[in-house]
Amino acid sequence: MKRAALLFAGLAAVGLVLGLTVSHVTVSSGSLAVAQSTESSVQEKIAASGQAAVKSAIARAAPAVVKIEVVKRVASIWDQFFDDPFFRRFFGLPQREVTSVGSGFVIDYAGKRYVLTNAHVVENATSIRVTAKSGKDLPAKVVGTDTVLDLAVLAVEDALDVPPVVLGDSDALEIGDWVIAIGNPLGLSHTVTLGIVSALGRDVPRPDGTGYFRRMIQTDAAINPGNSGGPLVNAFGQVVGMNTLIARSTESGVAVEGINFAVPINEILKAMAQIAVSGRVTRAWLGVYIQDVVPGMERQLGVRQGALVAEVVAGGPADKAGVKAGDVIVAVSGRTITNANDLQMEIMYRAVGEKVELGIVRGGRSMTIAVVLGERPAEEGQAPGVPPAAEKAEKFGLTVQDITSELAQKYSLRQASGVVVVAVAVGSKGYWAGVREGDVIVAVNRTDVANLAEWKQTVAGLREDEEVLLTVVRGGRTWFLLLR
């Protein structure tokens, strides 16, 4: 009897525990279900809010976006022989013209309406027609262009009765911000694509080889042929850039997607200030080729930041004032310069003929040099090199050789002194420093190197593990590269 009672009590205790446990699980499941429902509701509200913001941004910007149809005269082989109109009439040769499509958007500037697009969209145009979303179209004429930004400003008789875009601040953009591209890809009017800001301040080679587009906005918002000149819009419906360039493949031919570039609207407005008045942009020029100060260079240069002068253009403003290669510009008329981009922006939009005071660090010593700014010339293309073969020496993962007339021709070299890099070992110090095959090394630790013999003599006492500052010439331009 006692054993039965004990068994009953034990079972009751187990039941009690089980009951409590079941009850506890039931409560927890209910709480979890409520939490999951609440979280789902929050996510739905966030998604709905995001969609509403995107739709609102599109609605705000899209009415100002226009299609630009351009008739261009295209050169053919006959143009080389029959450029005279008499010969064309005599031989019955037609004028070859093609029609292309681009995008643009209406802005209000100084109380007047203009249409902005890319300069390459209207280049060599014989006729330009602008069509609004409503279908209304009118002829347009070019007010002025700026090849540096690939910008064209068009005038239309009544601006198509469309509202202008709201302009944003491209300097306020951050990586990860939502952006919207609106345009006419492949002639499909008012196509909208969505993406994010992938990177800022990109320097991108121009397709024609004439220098670089500077400080570009990189986005994965889809941009296709026909989008050129259309607006890049932020999540508030404000224009922050102009869609300009598409990356289709690498130099080796590998296809890429989602890498597109836009010109910042803030730079466009700086150029617009001159185009609206004179039809062109005149930029001030210092006459130097510059680069950033790489961490580790301070031991050689005596300063941690600034714009490092890699090369001084002979006869240019800086050359006349006494600026030298290896100088680090740290200030312009009292304004601090922390990198090469700072110097470019500080100089280029000043007036030609203006006198500025450059704060310079030379060999660890600070000085001030006054420079009268000149007018910036057009950028020149750079010729690619071809790998040569000759007597070689190796150090720091770099294989170098003397410059010969044959090598100078193959590499399109502009100087006869230095040593040519013919191979760079993957993973070596030279590789990680950015030395490329075809570079010409002209100095080691600021000591000139004129030939292979001097290279061997100069590097003989250097350990493989110590830092070395190379001065190299690449495509006719001088660069400082730190091996470490």
Image (cartoon, grey):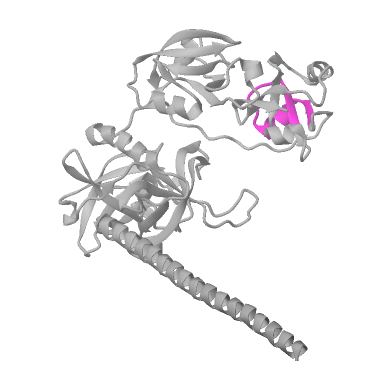
Nearer to the camera, 234 or 287: 234
Q: In which quarter of the image is residue 28?
A: bottom right
In the image, residue 306 sits, relative to residue 87, either above or below, namely above
Measured as percent of width and height from the top left, residue 401 is found at 79, 27
Measured as percent of width and height from the top left, residue 23 is found at 55, 78
Q: Quadrant of the C terminus?
A: top right
Magenta segment: does it hold 22? no
Magenta segment: does it hold 411? yes
Picture residue at 21% right of the left edge, 64% below the top = 134
Nearer to the camera, 347 or 184: 347
Q: Quadrant of the N terminus?
A: bottom right
Q: In the image as oriented, which residue stretches furthest toward the front?
A: 1
Part of the protein shown in magenta: 399-421
Q: How many labels does the image show?
A: 0
In the image, residue 34 sits, relative to residue 455, either above or below, namely below
Picture residue at 69% right of the left edge, 23% below the top = 470
Residue 92 in view here: no
**Left or right position of 205 against 129:** right
Q: In which quarter of the image is residue 38?
A: bottom left
Residue 38 in view here: yes
**Left or right position of 411 against 55:** right
Measured as percent of width and height from the top left, residue 8 is found at 69, 88
Nearer to the camera, 155 or 432: 432
Measured as percent of width and height from the top left, residue 468 is found at 73, 22
Picture residue at 38% right of the left edge, 56% below the top = 180
